[in-house]
Image (spheres, rainbow, N blue to C red):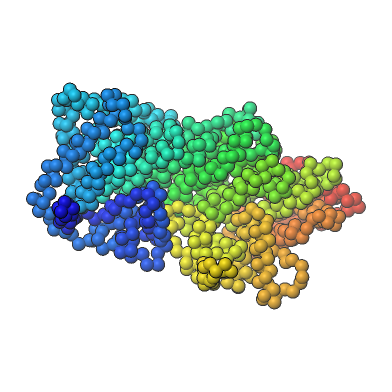
Amino acid sequence: MNAQKHIVPYYLVRKYNKSILCGFVWTNATISYRCRTCAANPCMSLCSDCFHNGNHQGHDANMFRSIGGGICDCGDVTVMNSNSFCKHHGPNRIPNAQIPYKLIRCAQILLPRVILRFVQHLRSHVSPIKSNTYSTIEEFTSLTSLFNLFDDLSNAGSCIRSIFTDCLLNIELYEKFNTQPSINDLSNISYNIYLQQLNETSSLLMPISLRTDNSSVYFHIKKATCLFDEILFWLVKYQIPERLLKFLLMLLTDLNFKRSCIQSFLNIYVMVIDQLIHCRNSRERMHSARLVHISVQLFSNIDITVQAIKDYHLMELILSSLYSIFSNIQINCQLQKPKENYHLVIYDIDFSKNMHYWPIISDFINILSHEYASKEFLLEKRFFITWIKMISWFQGMNVNHHEIESEILLQSNMNYLFAFTMETECCAMVLWTINAHIMKPDFLDITTKVINYLFLEVKQWFSSIGFEQYKDIIKNQVTFHIPLHRYISILSYLSLNYQNGELKTLFPIENEKFLLNLAIFPLRIQVVKYEILTNTIWSYHSYEMQIQSDMYSSTHGNICSYMNDADIFLLQLISTLVNINKFMEMFFKSFYVHEWLVQNTENNLIFEKSSYITLLEGSLIVLATIVAFSPHLVLDDFEHRRAEIINALVIQDCHYSYLDEHMGEPKSFATSKYDIQSIVDDIAEYISPTIDITNQPKQGQYKLKDFLWEDEFDPLHVLSRISRRDLFETTMQRYTKWVISMNKFSYEKNLWPPYRLHKPKDQFQTNLRCILQSRYLHGVFFSICHWMMNETIIHEDILSLLVYLCELAIDDQIRRLKYGEFLNGYAPSTIQPPQCHNNSDINHSISLETLTSLEDENIDEYKKQQQPIEFSVTEPSLFGVNINGDYGNLR
């Protein structure tokens, strides 16, 4: 009977619901949905009813079990496409009739009193009189009946929720409530209790780089002006109890209330930061992180976000919060000589494992998902400079050393996985989100300025780690974390390809030494990938280093696009801007190639010969990648996306979900708006589900269509997406199997990889081929050929790469002769290209100084010099690489 008395009124009131939003709130472990085709915001989610009643046929949607809870966004035009709203929500829903006054009159009288008593209850449990103060969420179980009542009333619809919101935002009601004379024996529920707790809260310091003449140095928590302000204060004070949070989330379906409460929410944001910094365990962090459920509802709305940026200093608050969190977990960087290094990097195992930074980073990315916010972030110099400073704290994290030198290094190596996670979530995701809005010529000037800021920060970083020139880099250490370099690389790629930018404008640097210094750290990472494969150089940390190499090249989580591809493109950029012989010298010295080619005796070598062979092969692979690989660095690039899916299918047959998760491309909310099904249908055949040998069902898979093996299998692409040689061997076995099945080859020995002779697509790719005309490189090639005659340890894989690079070099020369594809600033098509020349003062042995180069700016000096080089090969030692030449006359 009692149940019916409650049910009937709720049912009657619900008929008059006027809310255009669903607002259904769920707790953890609840099945919910996300449609990436419809999403206008990365945090969009739907309840089961709204998803199935909406229009999502053929969309890129997925079902997931919510970990921390959430709220349904159906009906919110700022979060998702209105065409996919269910019939019950959205601006076009059929409006209900006006609710009769007598039906809610009782609620209008009683609910404000219930709220007032609830606030008194919250105050009473922090009074000094009480010994059992609230410290954990479990103590809210005594209020279960009250929260059940709140839930039922909120579910009755917008009519009841409006009574709650009017009460919570009523300034006059709150003032009257606090000025009532306190009864002596109830002094623990007075307004002074709240004021005492408010005075004990900490303020948030604003970084110097963010301050202006008119700004305050601190973000203080302001005194509450309404019941909602104080309830939010207690919400954070009591570690965000789930039931109270759920009640507030249900009220956010009222758009007017949502717009009104943004200032109140930002007021208590400082308290959350303080809690995150001082969390003692992962449980406390999880409680504090629950506030993101409110922030995502507010920051997903573009109007509210713009208002908060303009009126309430939202960008300053978020950046100050991140600055405060990261500045509390720093140690000295261990790069180069640690005793001379004063650069600080982020370091804290517990902090990383528990992801204390995640709620704030999540809010930051959500804010930047709006074009206005990203543009404001880039236009306001102090915003981006502050962010660049924080990025620099990731630069040089988790330095790995050959030997175990100290306890701090051991601890650092235990933290390697979290370092990758932190850089990807904090640096990469922010950059991808910004890039989604600036891929148009209008933002060229902004991008150019940002790149200049990054150059200045890199220069400062070199100084702080005591690094003066690339030759001084210490080879027994490496860091995989250089986000400043990657920001320069990715923004330059975006500018050159989408903003009509010019390289000479983006890189106005005449200092060749600085450019080579800039190149050495990404090059060092490429070297380490192959040092690890030797199984000897990193013997102390072989397992940890292999895992890091896997992460660096991993397509899962799209790390490869941000790390490997960005590093490769930076090397490509720099190779077109510096003396090609100096670049090649630095390149092969980094791979220890000159040691083996010149010395090549057991007594002089520091590694085993097998290690040098691995490094030699690695150097040729990386060189071929620099010259011929096209990195995937922008969002929604159909051509690259297709190539990535083909690349995944040549390695193995894949499920659809695997292809979606392991596509090596940038990811942000914008990249969710594609459907890979059309690409998969075009390039793959579907293998229906079967029963395996253990009588278990086996999922259906996609298999690459046969004709693509011949036309689009790119071994270099495969090598750039893996770090283990066995995966490449498996790929070649699959290729060989296809070749035999097509009766194209019957030879018993292994096939060479079918490296592709791609035609340069633009002037930049044409310029890249220039390094293949380096005299230093030609000296290396001849030396390798010489030692192959005497060293059986050099295998055919190296020869295949050598032949491929020579083919590229010859193709480059032929193309310049036939089509006039000369470098900018070089001879036009009507002029014969520079020929090999012979000076009387140069020894005719095969050395780096006697081989031809295109790196001559004054073509007139060479037009008439067409004498061929004469080779003297009487002594085998003459094939050694001369590494001591003077390159001063090459420009």
Vertical placement of 742 versus 750: above or below? Answer: below
Q: Is residue 70 left or right of residue 179?
A: right
Residue drawn where x is 31% and y is 60% of the image: 50
Q: Position of residue 855 (x, y in %)?
A: 70, 50
Residue 121: tell me if it is visible: yes
Q: Quadrant of the C terminus?
A: top right
Q: Position of residue 546 (x, y in %)?
A: 64, 48
Q: Quadrant of the N terminus?
A: bottom left
Q: Position of residue 541 (x, y in %)?
A: 66, 42
Residue drawn where x is 69% and y is 63% of the image: 753
Residue 191: tell me if it is visible: no
Q: Nearer the viewer, residue 138 or 435?
A: 138
Q: Is residue 422 left or right of residue 469?
A: left
Residue drawn where x is 72% and y is 64% of the image: 752
Residue sticking out furthest to the bottom = 743
Residue sticking out furthest to the top = 184
Q: Nearer the viewer, residue 271 or 242?
A: 242
Dividing the picture into quadrants, the one containing residue 227 is: top left
Q: Nearer the viewer, residue 127 or 102?
A: 127
Vertical placement of 485 versus 658: above or below? Answer: above
Q: Position of residue 571 (x, y in %)?
A: 62, 48
